[in-house]
Image: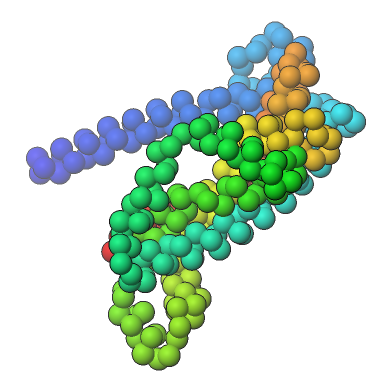
Amino acid sequence: MAIRAVQNKRKTMSFIVLLIVSILWLMPLVWGLATSFKTPQDISSNPTSLFPELWTLEHYQGLFNRPDTPVMRWMLNSFIIAGSYTVLYLIIVSFAAYAFSILKFKYRDQIFWIILSTTMIPTVINLVPLITMTIDFGWFGSWLSLIIPGLGGVFGMFLLRQFFLGIPYELVESAKIDGLNNFGIFVKIVMPLSKSAFLVAALFAFMGNWNDYLWPLIQFSGVDASMWTLPVGLSKIAGTYNYDYGLTMAAAILAIVPVVIVYALLQDKIIEGVARTGIK
């Protein structure tokens, strides 16, 4: 009984701590959402309140009606770029993860850990070489510069490799006996068993590209606004209309809505994929 009481106490304390952290994390989001529905007068008189005195859609209407803020165009650009990047990234990292988890070759693990160690290199260090590369290839200021360089990311490969290691190797051996080559094994055995892991990797890849700000800002400096991604467009709104907090918050809320919707629809699969990653 004493042990159970201690366990219950720990669970209660853990719940309280997590609840406090959740509230602290949600407060800025709730405040931003409330501010986007406030009137300018309400924002001036009650800037910290979480509930508008008078609900209004004028900030969202202004966001879509201003000719210098083509938000829907920016959102479409971000969808195309992030979607294309995610598909190509999953293809590349899944093949690499298969090689480093299922295939047997000399120095396999050593090569993997060397590649993984590159994640410790700060991204800022690579900016100048990447800019030079995009200029040499003629990609500077184009969407290709936002898709191709990021395909060398290691995190997705690590995530999928850890999941692939949990697949019983006997299945692979049985498939080889039945005459399947490595591509057939990957398509018919590994992929069907790893759907949740693919969803997690896809979500992280999509979110990373969707929310990227510094690299698109560098690439699109001096480029027509119709080519911009949503984060770059939002920075213009925040800079040009920095006095209009309602408009700025409406733009910020609009940027996170697609990611929230995707996560809400795939929440169970994402949690399953994260929980099972690394379990052999």
The quarter of the picture where the C terminus appears is: bottom left
Residue nearer the viewer, 133 or 198: 133
Can residue 203 be seen in this snapshot?
no
Task: Give the residue displayed 68% in from the left and 32% down from the top.
Answer: 218
Where 205 sits versus 241, above or below? Answer: below
User: Which is more toward the observer, 193 or 156?
Assistant: 156
Residue at the image point whose x is 45% and y is 86% from the top: 180
- Indicate the position of residue 45 as horizontal and vertical percent values: 70, 8
In-image side of 166 versus 154 (left or right): left
How many marks overall? Answer: 0
Is 177 displayed left or right of 135 in the figure? left
Among the 4 quarters of the image, the one containing residue 140: top right
Pick out the residue farthest to the bottom.
Answer: 178
Q: Position of residue 211 (x, y in %)?
A: 61, 38
Q: Quadrant of residue 109?
A: bottom left
Percent of width and height locating residue 234: 72, 29
Query: In which quadrant is the N terminus drawn?
Result: top left
Q: Visible in this render: residue 224?
A: yes
Q: Give the percent coordinates (x, y) of residue 137.
A: 70, 48
The residue lying toward the viewer, choosing from 11 and 25, is: 25
Residue placed at 38% from the left, 86% from the top? 176
**Residue pictured at 41% horizontal, 29% vertical:** 21
